């Protein structure tokens, strides 16, 4: 709550932050917790989520390669796969994804 008071001293923006809440349940606006303990691989079926704009899978235990099919997601603007056990090369087509931020 001390952080809240310094970021929003007039209590106009972060009203969802409260002393009895849990920031990792999604109830604190603007706060996301890292990792959900996920393991396994990222399936090429991810490409079926045509309207996906953000994929936040960082801080887990995913393994295997990043599927090339991920690059078919034209609306994907946020992609977080860091801090996993992924292997192989990053599909070069990721560099051509127009909506992806930070390229």
Image: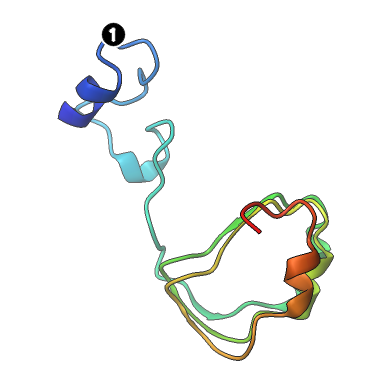
Residue picked out by circle 1: 10
In-front residue for pair 66/44: 66
Q: How is the image coloured?
A: rainbow
In the rendered structure, the answer to whether residue 33 lies left or right of residue 39 reads left
Q: Is residue 63 above or below residue 94?
A: below
Residue at image x 80%, y 50%? 51
The quarter of the picture where residue 40 lies is bottom right
**Residue 82 image offset from top left, x and y in percent:** 48, 70
Quarter of the view holding residue 20: top left
Q: Nearer the viewer, residue 27 or 14?
A: 14
Name the residue rendered at 37%, 10% in the picture: 12
Residue 81 higher or lower than 50, as above or below: below
Q: Is residue 46 visible?
A: no
Task: Tell whether 79 sits left or right of 43.
Answer: left
Is residue 99 visible in the rendered image? The answer is yes
Please state, as top left, top right, bottom left or bottom right, where the N terminus lies in the image: top left
């Amino acid at each position: 709550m001390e952080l809240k008071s310094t970021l929003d001293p007039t209590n106009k923006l972060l009203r969802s932050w409260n002393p009895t809440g849990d920031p990792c349940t999604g109830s604190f606006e603007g706060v996301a917790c890292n990792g959900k303990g996920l393991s396994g691989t990222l399936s090429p079926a991810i490409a079926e989520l045509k309207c996906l704009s953000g994929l936040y899978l960082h801080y887990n235990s995913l393994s295997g390669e990043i599927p090339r099919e991920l690059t078919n997601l034209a609306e994907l603007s946020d992609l977080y796969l860091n801090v996993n056990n992924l292997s192989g090369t990053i599909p070069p087509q990721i560099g051509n994804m127009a909506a992806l931020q930070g390229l």
